[in-house]
Amino acid sequence: MKYAIVLMDGAADEPLAELDGLTPLEKAHTPHTDWISTHGQQGLVHTVPSGFSPGSDVALMSVLGYDPKKYYTGWAPLEAAAQNIQTGPNDCIFRCNFVTVADGLMEDYSSGHIETVQADQLIKDLNSQLGNEQITFYTGVGYRHLMVYRDFIYEGKMAPPHDIMDQSISKHLPKGREAKELCRIMDRAAELLAEHDVNRVRQDLGENPATNIWLWGQGKRPQMDAFKQRFGVSGAVITAVDLVRGLGKLMGMKVIEVKGATAYLDTNYPGKGTAAIDALKEKDLIFVHVEAPDEAGHGAMLQEKIEAIEQIDLHIVGPLLKSLQDQGRDWRIMVLPDHPTPIRIRTHTSDPVPFTLAGKEVNSSRQMPYSEANARSSSLNIDKGHDLMEYFLKVD
């Protein structure tokens, strides 16, 4: 049996007046995903357990079959695993975003989607000026980076910057024990970034500068059981974000890099589709993650979100489905988001998401196009998101 999962990050949404009451999923032309839903099943899955914030970290962990209540330690440690950053049991790992703050407000959670080559220069200079035996900054992808503070404990909460757009940052600065130290680092970083040549160039070009760093998502490295040990199948992941790379590595799955995969709207959709087909020649299961719909949701870019969904269907779902049908072996395929990222509010919600699957021993039950509304009308409702993977692998 061969298994394929295509995850359209943040694709679920709300009915919008500008779409005459449709959601972006309903508006998008997705013939291949609709084929799966009409020839298989669709339903709802709750990917964010009660008590957790609706982040991709928690939601993706659930989709991949791991209970966040047992395995989750924070967002940043998952990205650290992707970079093979070695940390000790008393080290605290923080996500470190480059953001744009104007007049005390969070104006841009991504500093205009700063490119990695520019961000790397900033990270190197932060290390030069702020780094020491305890504090190290690590370059990630685009605006997403890490800071490790060794022999340091911080148990407070920090809001993700994409959750506080257009809000005063003063309300969301670190609180609790050791908060003063984190505020000191963030303030000193802002001073260094204000005079940096990279930001001067960005401002000259009319691009948002990286005015601040934002620390959040902290935790220690988690211990996770191997995916093959848990489910009896070998797997690989395709993604452009360190979060999913880290999850894959911690689960012992192969992480496949695709040239031109950017974690943004300009990602290499065809390349991901081709790589997924090739991966199934070696592995039993392929998990393809595409960040683009989520980025469009955060940016309130409606047409871009619709286009991203269509590109996933055309270049990833379609070729994967045809390859599975043509290969002469039993197969199953599933398509879903990890969480909604509604255009209206520009951030994640914890609402359940629609999933659809088809293939061997999956009886057709709805015969309706894939959408949030059609999934809600189904009797198939998986309350614990981490149970979805076993259902997908064991459907009868």
Image (cartoon, grey):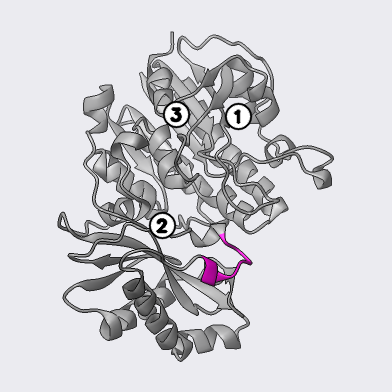
Q: CA distance from mark 1 to mark 3?
A: 21 Å
Report which residue position mark 2 lands on: 157
Rendered location of residue 5, percent (x, y):
45, 32
Name of the residue lying farthest toward the front = 176
Q: Which residue is mark 3?
A: 385
Q: Are marks 1 and 3 in contact (CB under 8 Å)?
A: no
Describe the element under mark 2 as helix, strand or loop.
loop
Span colored in magenta? 164-171
**Disc 2 or disc 3, which is closer to the eye?**
2
| Disc 2 to disc 3: CB gap under 8 Å | no
Looking at the image, is mark 2 or mark 1 earlier in the sequence? 1
> Residue 59: where, in percent of width, then height?
45, 39
For marks 2 and 1, give the one nearer the viewer. 2
Does the magenta portion include 335?
no
Relative horizontal placement of residue 55, taking residue 11 as reference (left or right): left
Earlier sequence position, callout 2 versus callout 3: 2
Nearer the camera: disc 1 or disc 3: 3
Q: CA distance from mark 2 to mark 1?
A: 38 Å
| Principal secondary structure, stretch drawn in magenta | loop
- Give the amino acid at mark 1: Thr
Q: Earlier in the sequence, mark 1 or mark 3?
A: 1
Q: Residue at x 43, y 60 (%)?
A: 158
- Residue 257 appears anywhere in the view: no
Q: Residues within 10 Å of mark 1 (few under 14, many from 20)?
A: many
Left or right of 369 in this view: 272: left
C-beta proximity under 8 Å, tags 2 and 1? no
